[in-house]
Amino acid sequence: MSADALRQRLLAWYDQGHRDLPWRRDPRPWPVWVSEVMLQQTRVESVLPYFARFMARYPTPSALAAAPLDEVLAGWAGLGYYARARNLHRAAQQCVERHGGAVPDDPAAFAALTGVGRYTCGAVQSIAFGHRLPVLDGNVARVLCRLDHLTENPRAPQSLTRLWARAAELADGKRPGDTNQALMELGALICTPKRPKCLLCPLQAACQARAAGDAESLPARPPRKARPRLQLVAGLARDAEGRIWFGRRPEEGLLGGLWSLPSVLADPPGPTALAALDLRAVGEPA
């Protein structure tokens, strides 16, 4: 089935009843961008209340750029992956510095902002501005792996090249933003990791994995990476009034930019690690 035919089926399905989400009701560049950042590694249901509060407090890039980082991080608390908030804050400042406070309607200029990768650039530029750019997240990769019966590791370089090219074919037509959202919606609601609802899929007639009877086994699972195990030693210091001393962690690295008890990596923990703590340079008492 041609890319045009696949796109038409996707859009017809999407138009018939996609989820009613606030950034779809208001597809201006800033709400779309904020939503895409929040949705990284986070479920829609968890994002909704944070998105509403964030947009009420920071309705424009300029409003976010003017806010203290500590305030932004406090509002992000509970959503996790705090680097997203720091990067978005810095990118908003760059919008003010370089683009008069606007989100640039230019893929190259937008991609030059802090924290904007290929996926975020494609999503925001296609949805908000209509640029024919693809997206590739976990949901889209799963749909495409099954559609084309890609049995290799989807994270391998050659697989990623193939998947991005396939996504670009589908985005290269009318309504690229809606096409991208339809692919993401299809992966989230129909072409799910387990028990995909193939009978409800608008692409079932073209799906090679369904024809082969192994849709649920795809995408192939990448080899598991061993999780690093970190051991830290933390120190607790009080002043004469009983106040506890905290320090801000470096912007880069574990829990970057957040306040914590002074700590050092220790392997193994013990007196040597404790001696490395400098309790005189940990900030101000809380």
Image (cartoon, rainbow, N blue to C red):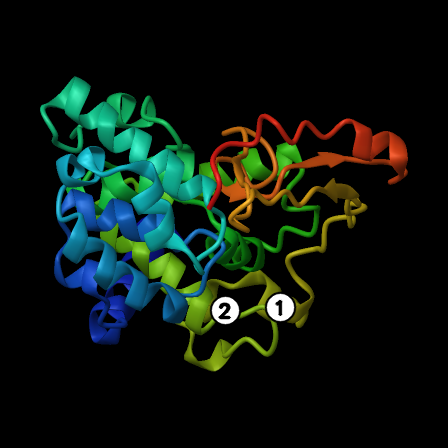
Please indicate whether residue 45 sits to the left or right of residue 196 in the image. left
The CA span between labels 1 and 2 is 9 Å
Q: Quadrant of residue 270?
A: top right
Q: Position of residue 215 (x, y in %)?
A: 62, 68
Q: Is residue 252 visible?
A: yes
- Closer to the eye: label 1 or 2: 2
Between 178 and 6, the one nearer to me in the picture? 178
Discs 1, 2 touching: Cβ within 8 Å: yes
Between 227 and 158, the one nearer to me in the picture? 227
Which quadrant is the N terminus positioned in? Answer: bottom left
Q: Residue at x 69, y 66 (%)?
A: 217
Between 98 and 169, the one nearer to me in the picture? 98
Q: Amino acid at mark 1?
A: Ala
Disc 2: which residue:
191
Q: Residue at x 28, y 70 (%)?
A: 13
Between 150 and 28, the one nearer to me in the picture? 28
Crowdedness near tag 1: few (<14), some (14–19) or many (≥20) residues, C-alpha within 10 Å: many
Q: Count all numbered tags in the image, as a single digit.
A: 2
Q: Position of residue 136 (x, y in %)?
A: 45, 45
Q: Classify mark 2: helix, strand or loop.
A: loop
Q: Position of residue 223 (x, y in %)?
A: 78, 48
User: Residue 215, which numbered label?
Assistant: 1
Farthest residue to the top: give it. 98
Task: Give the mark nearer the N terminus: 1 vs 2.
Answer: 2
